[in-house]
Image (tube, rainbow, N blue to C red):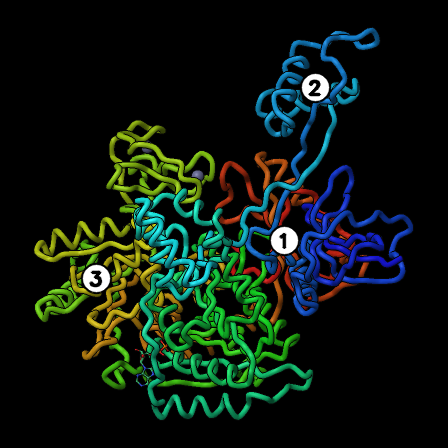
Amino acid sequence: MRYAELAVNSPGSHSTFCYAIPPQLDIDVGQAVWVPFGSRVIQGIVVELSDQPSVEVTKEIAETITDYPLLSPRQIELARWVSQHYLSPLFNSIALMLPPGFERKLITYFQYREGTSPSPTKDLPPLTPEQTQALHLIREKEKKSFKELERKFGPKKAKQICDQLLHYHLVMKSQEPEKAKVKPKSLPYVKLIASKDEIEDETARLNKSRAYKQAAVLEFLSQQTQPIAISEVKKRLDCSLESIRVLERRRLLSVELVNIRRDPLSHLKLKPSLPPPFTSSQQAAWKIIADNWTKRDDHGSPSVFLLFGVTGSGKTEIYLRALTQVIAMGKRGICLVPEIALTPQTVERFASRFPGRVGILHSGLSLGEQFDEWQRIKEGKCDVVIGPRSALFAPQPDLGLIIIDEEHEWTYKQEDKSPRYHARDVALKLAQLTGAVVILGSATPDIDSFHKAQLGVYHLVELKERITPHGYSPLPKVDIVDMKGELKVGNTSLFSRSLLAAMKETLAQGEQIILFLNRRGTATFIQCRNCGFVFRCPRCSVALTYHSAEKKLTCHRCHYAIPVPQACPQCFSHRLKFLGIGTQRVADEVKRLLPKTSLLRWDRDVTTKRYAHERLLSSFRDHKADILIGTQMIAKGLDLPQVTLAGIISADTGLNLPDFRAGERTFQLLCQVAGRAGRGFKAGKVIIQTYSPENYAIQSAAKHDYVGFYHQEIAYRRQYNYPPFSHFIRLVYYHTNNDLCRREAERVRDTILNEQERKGITKLSLIGPIPAFAARVRGRYRWQLILRGSDPAQVLPGITLPQGWTLDVDPVGVI
Ligand code: ADP
Ligand code: ZN
Ligand code: ZN
């Protein structure tokens, strides 16, 4: 007997399970199977084969789902690493790599047993009205799903009823997997099978007997060199399906199903493009990469390059060259870009360089498109896969290169569900397993990445100047305006005097402006001037945000909304003060001060619709408006050559958050905005308004001085023993009852402290329990513990956390 270790699709199961392989089944590592699990049958993935069972009693695998492995042994190894490192169930990590739409649940059905009678027999007690009703429902159809009965009677009752009916032997229970969510798409195609002479004779005959449509079909098909879709024939000739079927029955033509690829790029008009000759800086950068391509470090890991260059310095051209190189070596690549940068322009740039050989994977595609792309990639038909963080798990064979653009982006970390992985760290592991080279690109590298480059773990590759289609262009000049000074001279406007003057000048030149704000809504919150009361969400306890368009106060976490109150509920005063600023307020202010200018607003409120932001952007690029106002969304990846002025209304938001990465985040945002201006012919100008002009993040951003910022930041991290000098694990407990929530957090803190002492772990500190920054989300309280140390995970094995806890290893934020 052979045995298989399986990761099973059952929430919370961390270990693998051993199953016996029945002799008639051919099972391989990576294959998907159905297995009995408790009273259910669930999906499992084979992660290992052996001749010995790992437990005494084993059940047998029921059935295979696919007859070929879905995952390669390397992917399984990667999944094991992810689940170990991020302390998450193995199946969750494996699920990242499965084909789209793979996960299927099992449906329970009840079926009436023929030959028994619903009327009470001698030995059966009379049925209750509900049991009778249920039995009628079940008899109506061949079988009834338990779900439907649940809807009718409620979950508890339905179970009771069904158990009784089963006990009386009136019904049978069966289980079947739900229907596949997605399948290959196929369409009926027709082609002629009769000989040319036959067709000619037949056409003449049909015309004579006035069957003109059938004759036309034959004539049309005889002009085609390839099978053609029935729908196309019907449309072109305006004929019925029956005319085609008649010809089929007479064996003049045949109809067969043809697989159709749902192509997510079909709407792009692609012109194949050639690479431009490299500039001398690109040449120098490329030389470092090419020279070190095949080098291995002491542990046998392939090279990692940190490509450090401002936006517009030509990094993407380097990526494209590296991809060309890896393809020439007979291998393939994966290129990750932040979700927000996955625009048609970006995709087009890659797709036109490698026509027909680019695969794209992201959640914005239809499930059918995702499914077809996944299959195409697995079959080795894509030289390049491009997508957001999840594209790292594409089944790309012969992987030779992984590129991560904007590697500092926090969206590379999955935060909302397990495994809470960081795509950069997983990419490094995948590279080690496959021998793929890694290129990380950024204008403002993650502090940890730059630190590794300083240590020589990564090769640092620099691109110092910006290239525009018109040659090199200097970085914009940045001025810092101290808003305290504006207040002193009585300027209470959102705009400082110098920003307003610069705006007027820019508009007079016929150029464009972006105004940046790290917030949404017209006011962050409303406060009573009399008693200080602040309107908060009753479910989440965060301050409600004022939206002037709907005249509502809205919670940005749970979408709770109320009309704007007239008075304070605490002291009944009418003196409510609107605090903070939002894009709407900036827009109002622009209209007041510069009534003739046209403007566009970009933030998440406006751009929730798919492609809405692309439309907004292209109309701004076409100069349909002079000013674009937006939140952090506009800071990323836009190419707006006519913008010569960027104004940052308030740089302070975010700086004061209680998170050790607040400075890094602010610096990155400011640099990104600053990088927007002046990408065309003219040099740009940036104005940063702030109440803390001396802050080092703001100072360095104004000087475009990443390295200066890095040195201050890394000193601070070293001093306080923050990452990269230590590792964090964040444990959050959610509960609707605040007291219970806190007590559970305290209990786990004590357990951890005991375990630490028992194991004699020294380099570990524990922070908390403290309420999370937004202490309450969607009606649930959150208390958190933070573990910090050189290897904080070592205290956790042996501690079981009850439901309600989430674990985040290497969190990107701790608030
Ligand atoms: P990044 O990825 O660093 O933002 P890009 O590769 O997008 O930079 O380059 C910025 C602009 O310069 C793009 O419009 C690109 O087409 C152009 N560009 C890049 N390299 C060259 C080159 N060698 N010759 C001419 N134009 C170039
Ligand atoms: Zn009040
Ligand atoms: Zn809320």
Residue 77 locus on image (x, y percent): 70, 67
Q: Which mark is residue 630?
A: none
Within 10 Å of the Cα at label 1, are there few (<14), some (14-19), or many (20+) other Cα atoms? many
Q: Mark 2 and mark 1: span between their CA atoms?
A: 40 Å
Query: Residue visible at 25% across and 72% down?
Result: 677
Please tell me in which quadrant of the rendered image residue 423 appears: bottom right
Read off the residue under disc 2. 161
Tell me which amino acid carries mark 1: Leu
Q: Nearer the viewer, mark 2 or mark 1?
A: 2
Mark toward the start of the polypeptide (2 vs 1): 2
Looking at the rendering, in which quadrant would you find the N terminus? bottom right
Cβ(mark 2) to ligand 3 < 8 Å? no
Q: Mark 3 and mark 2: span between their CA atoms?
A: 63 Å
Q: Quadrant for ligand 1?
A: bottom left
* Number of marks in the rendered image: 3
Please tell me in which quadrant of the rendered image residue 725 appears: bottom right
Q: Which mark is residue 620?
A: 3
Instruction: Indicate the secondary structure of the residue bearing disc 2.
Output: helix
Name above or below for residue 390 compared with residue 356.
above
Q: Nearer the viewer, mark 1 or mark 3?
A: 3
Within 10 Å of the Cα at label 3, are there few (<14), some (14-19), or many (20+) other Cα atoms? many
Q: Which mark is residue 807?
A: 1
Tell me which amino acid carries mark 3: Phe
Instruction: Indicate the secondary structure of the residue bearing disc 3.
Output: helix
